[in-house]
Amino acid sequence: MDESVASRSTTPRRLLLVVAMVVLLAGCYGLPFYGFPLSMGLPLLTHVHRQLLWPAVSRRASLILSVLAWLGLWLPALVYFSTGLSLVASSPVEQSTAWLLIPLCGPVAPWTTFGPAAAAGLACLVGLLVTSLRRSPWSWLAATWAAPWVHQLVLQLLPNHEFIC
């Protein structure tokens, strides 16, 4: 009986720790040059701790979903960086996360670096919190795919969002 009580009380703590680690890595998303490799830890963390985050999902499905989540974070930047094509059809502004891969240019002001990154991290946090409450990976997957678009939108809404090289 004592073991089951102890096990039940450590599960929320472990879940909170996992959520904190994932949020920390998601927060690194906005670091120029370092965000890309640091964010590679996201699929590893979510897959390793899948029993806490989404216990009903199989090991294989968890791995696929975790990799898809990471891909969602970076697909717009990778497409723009590798082809020059922006997935933002209506905007003359380049994909806002592309400069994070290799920062040859960057935003003019500090808030244009941290504001969009914080908004993208917040999108990831909301998705992760909903995922941990629902015990389903779909909110996390949707949040990671939405994060670059949140980043783009917030950057465009900020005054003085030009880039310098």
Image: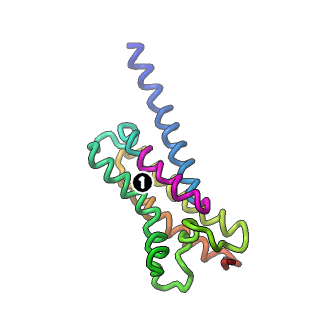
Residue at x-position 47% and y-position 76%: 80
Identity of the amino acid at label 1? Trp
Locate the N terminus by quadrant: top left
Judging depth in this view, the residue of 43 and 52 nearest the camera is 43
Residue 105 point in image, percent of width and height: 64, 74
Please indicate, yes or no, whether residue 57 appears anywhere in the rendered image: yes
Locate the C terminus by quadrant: bottom right
**For this view, does 58 lie left or right of residue 103?**
left
Residue 107 point in image, percent of width and height: 67, 73
Mark 1 highlights which residue? 140
Judging depth in this view, the residue of 135 and 141 nearest the camera is 141
**Is 7 covered by the magenta stretch?**
no
The magenta segment:
30-45
The quadrant holding residue 164 is: bottom right
Judging depth in this view, the residue of 25 and 130 nearest the camera is 25
Q: Tag 1: Cα neighbours inside 10 Å, few (<14), some, or many (≥20)?
A: many
**For this view, does 158 lie left or right of residue 45?**
right
In the displayed image of the protein, which residue is found farthest to the right? Answer: 109
